[in-house]
């Protein structure tokens, strides 16, 4: 039988954001979204400084030849039992290897520790791959927000209850 080759599993760790990461996160966000939706530096700074904001970054392990590199990040905020995912970004080259899932798991765990019982987010209705990501992680569409994005695209408001179900472990 012919042997099949599978891509090696990505090696990365999820850690808390540091101020030095800012420019890298800004650059990643510019690459992940079209210009109308990507955050300006001022917007990203504002979101990171929000009361209750938390940011987690995924960093690959680095090699003998290269330093560790940030490959994705997630920003959340919370108030009481309400959590909100502001953005999740993974560099295209590192997608579909579990980075997004790991970032989300960490962020959800930290939100739960803070007493959050329900997490909300908005996603563009034309972002086909992303809807599968959220549905697989237990998020359901709760409504449609017309012209939510600056380019006129609608958003789905999505949420997941942490009170009635355990965190996804996939
Ligand atoms: C959405 C995003 C964060 C996912 O990150 P990722 O690291 O690729 O996600 P994972 O590898 O952890 O994917 C976990 C699972 O989600 C689903 N999934 C993720 N991306 C998918 C896609 N494009 N199409 C279909 N399913 C997808 C799959 O079930 C996947 O598991 P599998 O690879 O074993 O099939 C990433 O695609 C991204 O940064 N996109 C651009 C920015 C963006 O749109 N962010 C979300 C805004 S709401």
Image (spheres, rainbow, N blue to C red):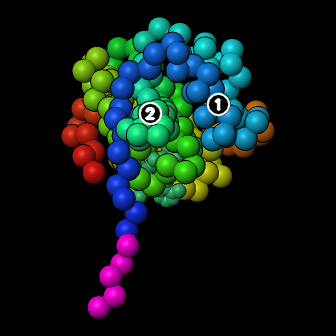
The residue beneath circle 2 is 68
Picture residue at 60% right of the left edge, 34% below the top: 28
Check residue 27 in the rendering and tell me which mark sits there, or answer none: 1
Picture residue at 61% right of the left edge, 12% below the top: 46
Q: Position of residue 164 (x, y in %)?
A: 23, 37
Q: Residues within 10 Å of mark 1 (few under 14, many from 20)?
A: some
Q: Position of residue 90 (x, y in %)?
A: 52, 41
In front here: 166 or 22? Answer: 22
Check residue 152 in the rendering and tell me which mark sits there, or answer none: none
Picture residue at 36% right of the left edge, 26% below the top: 15
Tell me: residue 168, above or below residue 19. Answer: below
Tell me: residue 101, above or below residue 150. Answer: below
**Which quarter of the figure is the N terminus placed in?**
bottom left
Picture residue at 32% right of the left edge, 82% below the top: 3
Which of the 4 image quarters holds residue 104? top left
Mark toward the start of the polypeptide (2 vs 1): 1
Q: Position of residue 20 (x, y in %)?
A: 52, 15
Is residue 170 visible in this depiction of the protein?
yes
Q: Position of residue 13 (x, y in %)?
A: 34, 35
Which of the 4 image quarters holds residue 7? bottom left
Extent of the magenta region: 1-5
Task: Say what secondary structure mark 2 lies in.
Answer: loop
Magenta stretch encompasses residue 2: yes
């Amino acid at each position: 039988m012919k042997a099949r080759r599978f891509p090696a599993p990505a090696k990365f760790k999820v850690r808390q954001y540091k101020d030095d990461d800012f420019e890298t996160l800004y650059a990643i966000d510019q690459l992940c979204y079209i210009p109308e939706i990507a955050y300006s530096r001022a917007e990203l700074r504002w979101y990171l400084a929000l009361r209750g904001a938390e940011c987690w970054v995924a960093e690959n392990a680095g090699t003998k030849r290269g330093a560790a590199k940030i490959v994705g990040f997630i920003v959340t905020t919370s108030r009481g039992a309400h959590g909100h995912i502001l953005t999740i970004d993974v560099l295209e080259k590192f997608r579909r290897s579990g980075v997004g899932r790991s970032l989300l798991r960490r962020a959800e765990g930290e939100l739960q520790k803070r007493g959050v019982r329900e997490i909300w987010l908005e996603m563009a209705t034309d972002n086909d791959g992303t809807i599968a990501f959220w549905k697989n992680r237990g998020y359901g569409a709760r409504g449609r927000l017309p012209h939510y994005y600056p380019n006129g695209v609608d958003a789905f408001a999505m949420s997941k209850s942490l009170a009635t179900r355990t965190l996804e472990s996939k």
